């Protein structure tokens, strides 16, 4: 569902939910931690109170009550009877299992901490009350009423709630024993100070209101912060989108998107977008030049063809010459069209055949020799295997040789030499050398440095551009240079080598 909402709202919702979960878990942990720490602290204080009671009770003239400001206490003798108030001793069912008496060998520093769960005492509540009421003093006087209230209060503290009890051991003097005639040990008492979770509950109760209000408020703040931050972070993206959306024509490709200052992925997006616009602008400019040049190149042979046909119609006696001229114009038109179609064709899959450059060189040299255009072969290895397309490599070398013959004075030299894990194929003509500023221009489409000579031989200005394109498709390079020992210009093709198949 969140995939259909805006990014800033989605980020705010996710951040708010995550913050709510984290803050709720933290609040729950804090509440439990405060409760446990408070309960542990009160238990330590109760242990101190239990040891104080054990130290002072034997020497006191009467039992201490410790009902106001302290935790209530329950005394149990060695026979398992509880003494909830002075002068009362009663045996309660199952009390010895909940609050067992101290062992007979317990010393003066003995102490014990037990937890009495409400689940264990809930079933004993009715029996304990009945057993206790039977042992309480009757009467309407204040002393009897106070004794009954004190005993009931201490027993009720054990019922219905989880209670921590801290015990200490002492022995009453003989004159304070309630049953001096009974078996020995009735005057040895185990005093349990009860620590109900009231203080811990009060401590966490003070946290409930701030936590209940604070957790949603903090989650809302996190969600709002995430919304604002995401919205501001996406501001540059919106600026990039708006700028790109405004580019509706190739005449607007000079425009660029704003680049943020921060070095992050949005900046990388802006730089990539600007780089793409640069490539698009360059491609559009190349396309405009290409269309203009192609139109010009196609117009010339079409015009010549049209003229020859008009001459043939107007002067039938010159029909043969007109048809021959028309065939030349048609042939030039065909070559230009083939070259344009090749350059417009997308790159094909990487060639996988193993081609021997030496074999192609010998084949072309033999062909040009029969046409009266000899090619001098320089140093050659026995074989020069490369991975590529035989037809394309054949066309590459043919274009280099055609260009060399158009510009050569007397001779064209073709050599193949090993160089840097590959092969250097050099085609040299001894004509006028190229100017340094023209060494790269000659590879541009429809570039003619000598218009008259090119048009006389039917050159289209695309041969070298096609040759370099084929070289790049075969992971090679094609360059021109004039720093050769002999006069003229040398075109050097470098192709990576491969092992010939057996």
Image (cartoon, helix red, strand yellow):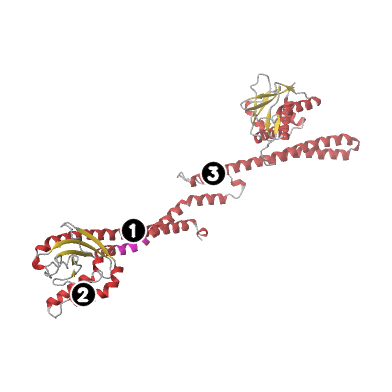
Gap in angstroms between the C-alphas marked 3 and 2 = 88 Å
Q: With 38 as the anchor, is 328 left or right in this view?
A: right
Under circle 2, the secondary element is helix
Residue 272: numbered disc: 3
Residue 207: numbered disc: none
Q: Is residue 419 above or below residue 444?
A: above
Q: With 95 as the anchor, is 85 left or right in this view?
A: left
Within the image, what quadrant is residue 440 found in? top right
Q: With 39 as the anchor, is 372 left or right in this view?
A: right
Q: Give residue 51's position: percent from left, percent from top.
A: 16, 59
Residue 29: numbered disc: 1
Q: Which residue is mark 2?
A: 132
Q: Earlier in the sequence, mark 3 or mark 2?
A: 2
Q: Residue at x 66, y 24 (%)?
A: 417
Q: Is residue 53 something that shows in the picture?
A: no
Residue range in magenta is 207-215
Gap in angstroms between the C-alphas marked 1 and 3 = 48 Å
Q: Tell me the crowding category of disc 3: few under 14, some 14 to 19, or many 20 or more residues within 10 angstroms, Cα based.
A: few
Q: Is residue 283 above or below residue 104?
A: above
Q: Is residue 39 something that shows in the picture?
A: yes
Under circle 3, the secondary element is helix
Q: Give residue 392's position: percent from left, percent from top.
A: 71, 35
Q: Is residue 376 above or below residue 141?
A: above
Within the image, what quadrant is residue 254 found in? top right
């Amino acid at each position: 569902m969140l995939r259909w909402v805006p990014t800033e709202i989605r980020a705010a919702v996710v951040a708010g939910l995550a913050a709510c979960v984290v803050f709720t878990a933290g609040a729950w942990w804090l509440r439990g931690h405060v409760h446990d720490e408070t309960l542990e602290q009160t238990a330590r204080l109760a242990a101190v109170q239990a040891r104080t009671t054990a130290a002072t009770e034997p020497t006191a003239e009467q039992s201490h009550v410790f009902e106001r400001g302290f935790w209530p206490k329950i005394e149990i003798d060695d026979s398992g009877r509880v003494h909830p108030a002075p002068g009362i001793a009663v045996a309660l069912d199952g009390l010895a299992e909940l609050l067992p008496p101290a062992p007979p060998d317990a010393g003066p520093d003995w102490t014990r901490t037990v937890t009495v769960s409400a689940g264990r005492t809930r079933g004993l509540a009715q029996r304990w009350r009945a057993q206790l009421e039977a042992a309480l003093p009757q009467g309407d006087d204040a002393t009897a009423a106070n004794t009954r209230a004190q005993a009931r209060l201490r027993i009720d503290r054990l019922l219905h709630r989880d209670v921590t009890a801290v015990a200490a051991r002492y022995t009453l003097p003989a004159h304070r024993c309630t049953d001096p005639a009974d078996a020995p040990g009735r005057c040895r008492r185990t005093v349990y100070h009860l620590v109900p979770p009231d203080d811990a509950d009060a401590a966490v109760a003070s946290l409930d209101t701030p936590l209940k209000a604070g957790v949603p408020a903090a989650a809302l703040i996190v969600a709002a912060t995430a919304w604002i931050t995401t919205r501001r972070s996406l501001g540059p993206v919106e600026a990039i989108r708006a700028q790109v959306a405004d580019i509706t024509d190739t005449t607007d490709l000079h425009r660029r998107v704003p680049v943020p200052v921060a070095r992050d992925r949005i900046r990388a997006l802006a730089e990539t977008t600007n780089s793409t616009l640069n490539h698009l602008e360059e491609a559009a400019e190349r396309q405009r030049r290409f269309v203009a040049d192609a139109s010009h190149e196609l117009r010339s042979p079409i015009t010549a063809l049209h003229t020859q046909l008009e001459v043939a119609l107007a002067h039938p006696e010159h029909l043969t010459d007109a048809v021959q001229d028309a065939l030349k114009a048609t042939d030039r038109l065909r070559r230009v069209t083939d070259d344009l179609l090749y350059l417009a064709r997308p790159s094909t899959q990487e060639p996988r055949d193993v081609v021997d450059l030496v074999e192609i060189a010998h084949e072309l040299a033999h062909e040009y020799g029969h046409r009266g255009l000899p090619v001098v072969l320089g140093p050659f290895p026995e074989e020069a295997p490369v991975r590529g397309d035989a037809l394309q490599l054949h066309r590459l070398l043919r274009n280099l040789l055609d260009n060399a013959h158009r510009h050569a004075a007397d001779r064209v030299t073709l050599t193949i030499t090993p160089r840097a894990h590959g092969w250097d194929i050099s085609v040299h003509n001894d004509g006028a050398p190229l100017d340094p500023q023209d060494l790269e221009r000659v590879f541009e489409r429809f570039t003619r440095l000598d218009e008259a000579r090119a048009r006389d031989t039917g050159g289209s200005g695309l041969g070298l551009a096609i040759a370099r394109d084929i070289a790049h498709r075969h992971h090679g390079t094609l360059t021109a240079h004039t720093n050769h020992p002999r006069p003229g210009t040398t075109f050097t093709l470098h192709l990576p080598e491969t092992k010939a198949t057996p």
